[in-house]
Each structure stands twice: as C-alpha cells, then as structure tokens.
Image: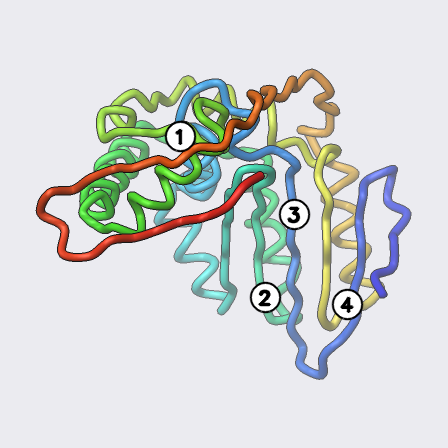
Amino acid sequence: EAERLNINNYKVYCVKGGTEPVIKLEIIFPYGNRTETNKLIAAATNYLMNSGTHTASSKELMENIDYYGAFYQHDNSFDRSSLSIYTLKRYYKEIFEIFFDIIQNANSPESEIDIYKENSKQRFIINSTKNDFLARRAFNYALFNEHPYGYKIDQNDFDSISRDQILAYYHSNYKLKNSTIIISGDVSDDVISALSNHLQNDATSEVNNTITLPEFNEYKKQVYFEERKDALQSAIRIGRP
C-alpha cells in the first residue's frame, strides 16, 4: 500500500518495492484535453515539456538523461497528463535536478514546436488512411460531439498551434501543488529528502482553482456512418456513455 508522505501539503505517495537499485518518479496533473481552450494544445504542451528550458536545449536535456542511464516518459489523455523519470538510485540527485528543471522551467522553443507540428501532421495524415483510426474518431464524435472528448480535428489544426498557446497552457496547468506525485522502487530517506527539497523550492506552487470544465450535451441514440469509397474493409464501434 502506498504511504502518504508529509511534504508541505503536496500530494506525495511512496511505494517501496523491488530488489533492484532503481527509482521511478511520476508526477500526474489533473488536466488533459478537457481543459484546453484550443484544439491539440494539451497534447502539444505535454509532448514539448522536454523540448528545452531556460538553461538547457532539448538535445542537452536528452543527452544528460541518457548519460545517467535514465528514461524519461510523458503521457496525455482526456482527463490527465503525466511526466515520469526512471533512474538508477546512484544518480537520483542528478536526475531529479534535470527532471524538475523540465517541469518548472519548460520553454518550448519555436524551432521545436515547428518540428512537432510538422511531424504530428504527417502522422495524422497517415492515420487518416486507416479504418480503425477513422472509426475511433467517428465513435468519439458520435458520443460527445464538440466536447473535448469527441471533437474532430483536421490537418490544418496542427498549423494553428502557437507557442503563446502552449506557454499559456503550461503556466496554467503544470503546477506541482495541483499534482499527485508518486515515487517508487528503492526509496530511502535520502531520496525522500532530495525530493522534499525540490518541492520546497517549487516556483510553480500556486494552486490553480480556476479551471472550468465543458459540459456534456444530452446523449441521443444514433447510428453513425462514415464512408471511404476505396476501403477494402469496414471498422465497427458499438457503445454508449
């Protein structure tokens, strides 16, 4: 069972386990696609968190993480987003420094955003030729319509992503006081102490209570078709809220 740690009112949980000298630190933010005011911004912000800080470029961040044999991971969904780092215990101090620099000082340079937009658009174009992708998109839209759970995007939406939107979303949502923090693995008192020091020095700790979530429209039973004339197969989704 996870142990709740008493660190200055932060929601920090510790799970000690395993036999290897490895640590995982995961930070979960309760904001995903449903809190964005511009399409695609939540996912773009999450993806670009490690694209550069005020003191280090994306290349430098990743080279430093690789140097210490660590592994960085990010995830974004409808309801939440998260950032994780896996590290050998012997390098936890160095990795914590890098990880919290990413969280607290993300800068998202324009050049990195341009690369992300172009790559994401190309992936979307390729996926748009696949029946399962189209069926999943149509299914979500049939259930939720223009709510962030269901709205449709097209390739032009990627061109509309801007650095100002990304930074605004980052500053509003990536606040550690709003997050749930889970540290697991070979966790000792000195590891807890290092984590506590980073949280005490958090410059993003102002709690954000201003988010308003979009309402769902009334659900109406329906059959929804989307035809591709050149398709050799069909994809079917059946479900309800």
Q: Earlier in the sequence, mark 1 or mark 2?
A: 1
Disc 2 to disc 3, C-alpha distance? 15 Å
Residue of label 1: 40
Q: Quadrant of the C terminus?
A: top right
Judge whether 168 appears above or below 18 on screen: above
Residue picked out by circle 3: 27
- Going from N to C along the chain, the mark reached first, 3 or 1, is 3
Residue underneath mark 4: 187
Pointer 3 with pointer 4, Cβ within 8 A = no
Q: Mark 1 and mark 4: span between their CA atoms?
A: 36 Å
Please name whichever residue, 112 or 157, is drawn nearer the observer in this view of the structure. 157
Say if mark 1 contacts mark 2, CB within 8 Å: no
Q: What is the CA distance from the residue labelled 1 to the residue labelled 2? A: 30 Å
Q: Amino acid at mark 1?
A: Leu
Residue mark closest to the camera, 2 vs 3 = 3
Cα–Cα gap, marks 2 and 4: 11 Å
Q: Which mark is residue 87?
A: 2
Q: CA distance from mark 3 to mark 4?
A: 16 Å
**Residue at the spot 25% in from the left edge and 32% down from the top edge:** 114
Quadrant containing the N terminus is bottom right
Residue type, mark 2 in image = Thr
The mark that comes first in sequence, 2 or 4, is 2
Image depth: mark 3 or mark 4 in front = 3
Q: Amino acid at mark 3?
A: Ile
Badge 4 local density, few (<14 within 10 Å), some, or many (20+)? some
- The answer to whether 75 is drawn above or below residue 216 in the figure is below
Disc 4 marks a residue whose amino acid type is Val
Residue located at (48% from left, 39% from top)? 46
